[in-house]
Amino acid sequence: MRHPAHFIALGFGSGLARQAPGTWGTLAGLPCYALLLFWLTPVQIAWFCLPVFALGVWAADVTGKALGVHDHGGIVIDEIVAIWLVLTIVPHSGSGWLAAFAVFRFFDILKPWPIRALDAHVPGGFGVMFDDLVAALYAIAVLLGLMHFWPSLLRY
C-alpha cells in the first residue's frame, strides 16, 4: 500500500478484504461517487471516468506486476470506475443505487460473452479495466431498459 499505484489499484484498501474483494471494491465506489456529486453532475462524472480509467490502467498494471498476478482479485479500481459509470444513469435514490450495484455485480461475476474472453485474453492493466467497463455497459443497458419499461421502479 506504500506505492501510490497499489493504493489506487487496491481501491484505497477495500480490495484487501479476504472475502469478495470485488464486491467490497464496488461498495467503496458508492461513497466516492456520493462525494463526487458535491462538485460534479452525473454527466461530468461520466467524463471524469475517462482519466480515472487511464489512471486505473496504470495502477492495475503496476500492481499486477508487483503481485505477479495479471488480474489479482484485490485489484478493484476497475469495479470502482465501472460502478461510477453505472450510477450516472440511475436516479439518485436508494433503489436506483441498489439496482446499479446489483446489476453491475451480476454481470461482473457472471462475465457473459465477451467479458470472459476479454478478461482472459486482454493483458495488462488495460485488460483489468476493460472487462469491467463492458460489464458496466451491460448493466447500463439492462437498467435503461428497466427504467424505460417500468419508470417508477427506481424512484425511491
Image (cartoon, rainbow, N blue to C red):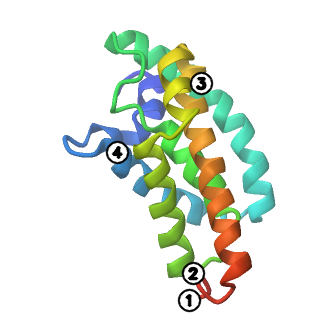
Q: Earlier in the sequence, mark 2 or mark 4?
A: 4
Q: Residues within 10 Å of mark 3 (few under 14, many from 20)?
A: many
Position of 51 with respect to 97 (left or right) is right
Q: Residues within 10 Å of mark 4 (few under 14, many from 20)?
A: many
From the top left corner, tell me how far across and down residue 17 is, in percent: 24, 43
Do we see residue 106 in this rendering? yes
Residue that numbered label 2 is attached to: 93
Q: Residues within 10 Å of mark 2 (few under 14, many from 20)?
A: few
Q: Earlier in the sequence, mark 1 or mark 2?
A: 2
Quadrant in which the C terminus is drawn: bottom right
Residue 14 tag number: 4
Residue that numbered label 1 is attached to: 156
The secondary element bearing badge 4 is classed as helix
Q: Are marks 1 and 2 in contact (CB under 8 Å)?
A: yes
Which quadrant holds residue 35? bottom right
**Residue plotted at (46% across, 45% down):** 108
C-alpha gap between disc 2 and disc 3: 30 Å
